[in-house]
Image (cartoon, rainbow, N blue to C red):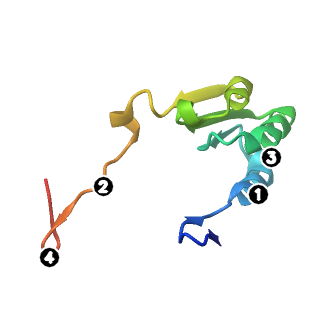
Amino acid sequence: LQEFASGAKKADWDVGLAVDAIRISALVDVVVICSGDGDFIPLVEYLQHQGRLVEVAAFRPTTSGKLQNLVDDFTDLAADPKRFIIRARRRRGRGEEAP
């Protein structure tokens, strides 16, 4: 976890996710990556070379174009937000949830 002077925080889990995907790749037929980060292109190429199908689920406007073209299937989470995005419920008072 990186913390910047502004107080913003960023977790870099790319390497951990890649290691986990490689570790389980012999046990699965399909790997689904929920990120549009182009840093995953070498992972996708490796997994496909190993005979695995690779799918990405991410928001198209912020997803690497090369990644979209490389994967076996791409799900655009922005295409149908009501299907994929869960809105947080607002809380009222002491533990009452808003409708």
How far across and down, in percent of the image, does residue 20 sit? 74, 56
User: Do the residues under discs 4 and 1 have CB atoms within 8 angstroms?
Assistant: no
How far apart are labels 2 and 4 at the CA level?
A: 17 Å
Q: Is residue 32 above or below residue 94?
A: above
Mark 1: which amino acid? Answer: Val
User: Do the residues under discs 1 and 3 have CB atoms within 8 angstroms?
Assistant: no
How far across and down, in percent of the image, does residue 69 sit? 70, 23
27 relative position to 87: left or right = right
- Residue 94, disc: 4
Mark 4: which amino acid? Answer: Arg
Is disc 4 placed on a helix, strand or loop? loop
Marks 3 and 2, the one that precedes in the sequence: 3
Q: Is residue 15 above or below residue 69?
A: below
How far apart are labels 1 and 3 at the CA level?
A: 18 Å
Q: Residue at x 14, y 76 (%)?
A: 94
Pair 4/3: label in front: 4
How far apart are labels 3 and 2 at the CA level?
A: 37 Å
Marks 1 and 2, the one that precedes in the sequence: 1
User: Which residue does the numbered mark 2 point to in the structure image?
Assistant: 88
User: Which residue does the numbered mark 3 point to in the structure image?
Assistant: 26
- Residue 15, disc: 1
Marks 2 and 4, the one that precedes in the sequence: 2
Q: Is residue 97 above or below residue 68?
A: below
Q: In the depicted view, which residue is nearer to us: 49 or 38?
A: 38
Q: Residue at x 14, y 58 (%)?
A: 98
How far apart are labels 1 and 2 at the CA level?
A: 29 Å
Alpha-carbon neighbours of circle 2 within 10 Å: few (<14), some, or many (≥20)? few
